[in-house]
Image (cartoon, grey):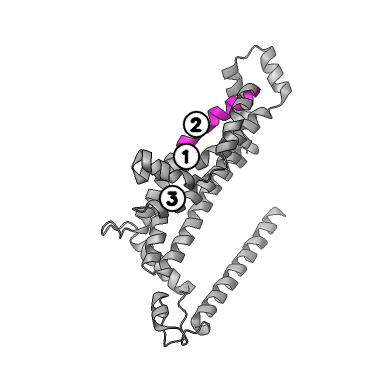
């Protein structure tokens, strides 16, 4: 039954994709007329002022551009002309560093808050004050103090990844069943061993939920951060291609950003399923 449902869902997804691509191709194949455009505006938008071709690229154009990037993803022709693979590697590296630092900080503090109601109440005002602040609001302060755009982007990723992991960890730890903790106390299990052998396995699914939320937010924020600081990264690549009026490359970048985000999410989703429903 489950296999049949997955098969039907796959066929439906494929049909929707084909329908979308056909509609897109038809829409840009002369339906959007530009004869009445002002010549300067048409040139700005990358369209012809005398033909009926749309300024928006179609899926065939995007496919050709993707193939071009796949053939040579790591070329380096100067500061403003690097391959998509290089730009993507910079972004993934920054996310990995910022996210890793957030894991190191958030999970221990979350354990502390979940295991100690006193620390939970003491730290709660600070968490509630800092949690709603947009990660990008930290960027000017980071640039001023760190004075390095790459490290500043990593700091912003750290900040935006911190809160979902911390809160979910505290929630999972605090929700550990009382009877399990009582048994551990009866057996005179120390706090550290109790945290590792009893609380961590019980809270692991909730902790991974927070990690999964955080990686999605981190990947969203790195694109915006790199647009602000420039230099390298997939966000900078998108902004630079827009400045070059290469809408085809912009669309290609959007697809790549979505694909990488989906892969990152699915890796953590798989880990969460393995812990929640071990095979």
Question: Is residue 87 in view?
Answer: yes
SS type, badge 2: helix
CA–CA distance between discs 2 and 1? 9 Å
Q: Mark 2 points at which residue?
A: 105
Residue in the image at 61% along x and 36% along y? 168
Above or below 27: residue 240:
above
Picture quarter with the N terminus: bottom right
Q: Which of disc 1 and disc 2 is earlier in sequence?
A: 2
Q: In which quarter of the image is residue 23?
A: bottom right
State how many labels appear. 3
The residue tagged 1 is 158
What type of secondary structure mainly makes up the magenta span?
Answer: helix
Query: Given contact means CB atoms under 8 Å apart, are the residues at marks 2 and 3 in contact?
Result: no
Q: Does the magenta stretch include residue 257?
A: no
Q: Is mark 1 on a helix, strand or loop?
A: helix
Question: Residue 29: x, y in percent?
Answer: 49, 81
Label 3 sits on residue: 225
Q: Which of marks 2 and 3 is in front?
A: 3
267 horizontally vs 174: left or right:
left
Q: How far apart are marks 1 and 3 (CA)?
A: 12 Å
């Amino acid at each position: 039954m489950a296999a049949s449902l997955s098969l039907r869902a796959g066929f439906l997804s494929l049909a929707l994709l084909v329908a979308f691509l056909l509609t897109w191709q038809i829409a840009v194949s002369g339906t959007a007329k530009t004869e009445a455009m002002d010549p300067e505006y048409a040139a700005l938008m990358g369209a012809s002022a005398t033909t009926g071709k749309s300024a928006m690229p179609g899926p065939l154009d995007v496919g050709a551009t993707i193939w071009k990037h796949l053939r040579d993803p790591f070329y380096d022709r100067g500061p403003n002309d690097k391959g998509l693979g290089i730009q993507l590697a910079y972004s993934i590296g920054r996310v990995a560093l910022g996210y890793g630092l957030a894991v190191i900080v958030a999970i221990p503090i979350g354990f502390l808050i979940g295991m100690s109601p006193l620390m939970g109440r003491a730290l709660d005002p600070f968490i509630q004050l800092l949690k709603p602040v947009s990660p990008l609001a930290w960027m000017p302060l980071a640039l001023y103090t760190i004075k390095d755009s790459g490290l500043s982007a990593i700091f912003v990723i750290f900040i935006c990844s911190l809160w979902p992991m911390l809160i979910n960890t505290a929630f999972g730890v605090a929700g550990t069943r009382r009877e399990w903790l009582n048994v551990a106390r009866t057996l005179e299990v120390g706090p550290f061993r109790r945290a590792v052998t009893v609380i961590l396995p019980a809270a692991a699914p909730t902790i991974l939920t927070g990690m999964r939320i955080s990686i999605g937010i981190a990947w969203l924020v790195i694109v915006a951060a790199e647009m602000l600081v420039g230099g390298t990264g997939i966000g900078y690549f998108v902004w630079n291609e827009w400045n070059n009026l290469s809408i085809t490359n912009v669309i290609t970048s959007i697809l790549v950003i979505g694909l990488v985000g989906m892969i990152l999410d699915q890796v953590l989703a798989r880990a969460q399923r393995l812990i929640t429903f071990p095979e």
